[in-house]
Image (tube, rainbow, N blue to C red):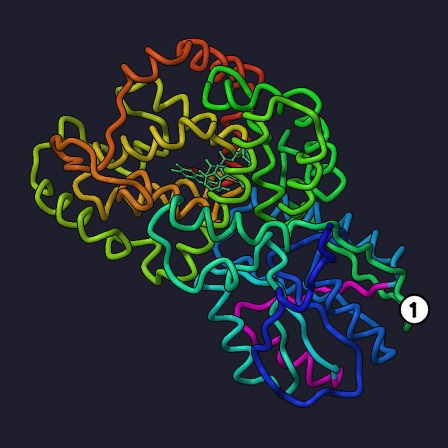
Amino acid sequence: MLSKFNIQDRVRLLNQGIEGLGDVIYWMSRDCRLQDNAALLFAQSIAIAKKRHLRIVFDAQFAGESPRQQGFLLQGLQELAVDCKEFNLSCEFLYGRNAIPLVEFTKLNKVCCVVTDFDPLKFHQSRKHDFCKSSTVPVYEVDAHNIVPLWFASSKLEFAAYTIRPKITKLLPIYLTEIPELLIHPYGTAEIASIENQSDGGNELKSGESQAKIKLSQFIESKLDAYDELRNDPSLNFQSGLSPYLHFGMISAQRVALEVRKIDVNPDSKAAFLEELIIRKELSDNFCYYNPNYYNFNGFHSWAQSTLNEHRHDPREYLYSLEQFENAETHDKYWNAAQREMMITGKMHGYMRMYWAKKILEWTRSPEEALDYAIILNDKYSLDGRDPNGYTGIAWSIGGVHDRAWSERPVFGKIRFMNDSGLKRKFDIEKYVENIKLLQNENNNIGNSVHSLFGGL
Ligand SMILES: Cc1cc2nc3c(=O)[nH]c(=O)nc-3n(C[C@H](O)[C@H](O)[C@H](O)COP(=O)(O)OP(=O)(O)OC[C@H]3O[C@@H](n4cnc5c(N)ncnc54)[C@H](O)[C@@H]3O)c2cc1C
């Protein structure tokens, strides 16, 4: 029997407070969509029970987002604002670098309560904490991003995929169920703020909830069947390309999983895709939420810290500055192609991401420097950057997080090693380099557009 979609389990009360007489607020942050959004559904259920209007407030702090990421987000929010009207929901934007504008907004509008979505990253957790300290109304947090709410999946830092997998798998029949539809809101009248998007997106990926759905259908139709066999090959393009949309919450992982489950394709491909989308993705949230050092050396397991310390002073064959990495000026054409792919498209092939980060460890003075460089570049150029998956993927590559010890070698110690012979043996990696060259030629304005996107290198 199918379980009913359970919203209550996804909700935590962050602040007791006393309800005001005004509207219910959904403080949207990580999950920028109207459909399949448990936080919005929960906010709507309160608003309907109390016969209040429902207002979506997005506080655009843009702390650290690059113009490329801002452009993608704002384009998606423009679509969202238009759709809000259809559902009689107000949509507003607050600007500021801390919780103060939102605190003032709730006071001024005597809001009933605030519902927000969940994000494990430090910056978002501390914003929520600051907001709750000053807020007098109830504040609820809803995990609208993970299929199994993070706090139910596990209450502790998990060691690896094999430790979290059985926990999530056991809970999937309860949580991976059809999601109720958003209702046309019966109370109040929608007011929609206009959103300016001045970023020069160039020929960047199109953003928004409708594009995310198109991307999902295209993937299901033309790539899912061969995903198991071909997803790792950088010369082909058999990944879903959904990560920018998942990162900004323009599509829910739950919707993706439900649609993929329905389709009759190669079962190994289906299983491989759901492993990435559910287990690996939710493991990343677990790592960032329960490990306060998710972005630094202290976040690595002790075996990894010891082995990297033992090899700290090993001579490096090549050493590059951040600028040389950024400009794709290493001696390695495969690495340079991967860096260019990320700069041109806003996304690097998943297999190359591992190679890319591991080589940064090999060609920098210390694991700390390698981590910093990898995070800076990934967060700056990847549309899906600044995400738990990114911090965890980098910690996996450089610090063996969720991995095991391998045979020992210079610089890496017992951290898993990758080299270009592996790329040549497994794939037509020259074709990948050619593909990136073609992309660069097609984008003959790329020098200018990259320059304008990032204010120079
Ligand atoms: C060094 C490094 C940096 C990374 N940086 C990011 C990042 O900034 N943002 C990001 O979303 N992912 C990151 N990843 C994880 C992974 O490479 C990407 O999620 C994936 O390549 C995104 O492309 P896709 O959506 O086409 O993936 P698909 O293969 O189609 O997978 C579907 C979804 O499953 C999830 N997923 C897939 N692989 C992983 C993984 N290894 N760990 C966690 N979740 C996964 C993602 O949500 C992805 O969108 C990084 C990995 C490494 C090794």
User: Quadrant location of the C terminus?
Assistant: top left
Q: Characterize the local packing of mark 1: few (<14), some (14-19) or many (20 or more) Cα atoms within 10 angstroms.
A: some
Q: Residue at x 91, y 72 (%)?
A: 187
Percent position of residue 347, x then y = 51, 33
The residue segment tinted magenta is 89-110
Q: Is residue 20 above or below residue 129?
A: below
Q: Residue furthest front?
A: 1
User: In the image, is residue 97 part of the stretch drawn in magenta?
Assistant: yes
User: In the image, is residue 301 part of the stretch drawn in magenta?
Assistant: no
Q: In the visual, does 290 lie left or right of 422?
A: right
| Residue labelled 1 has its Cβ within 8 Å of some atom of ligand 1 | no
Badge 1 element: loop
Percent position of residue 328, x then y = 36, 27
Q: Is residue 31 above or below residue 8?
A: above
What amino acid is found at the position of numbered circle 1 in the picture? Pro
Percent position of residue 206, x then y = 68, 35
Q: Quadrant of residue 221?
A: top right
Q: Residue at x 39, y 54 (%)?
A: 287
Tell me, yes or no, if residue 27 can be seen here.
Answer: yes
Q: In the visual, does 173 lie left or right of 370?
A: right
Q: Quadrant of residue 263?
A: top right
Percent position of residue 130, x then y = 50, 77
The residue beneath circle 1 is 186
Tell me, yes or no, if residue 146 can be seen here.
Answer: no
Q: Nearer the viewer, residue 186 or 171?
A: 171
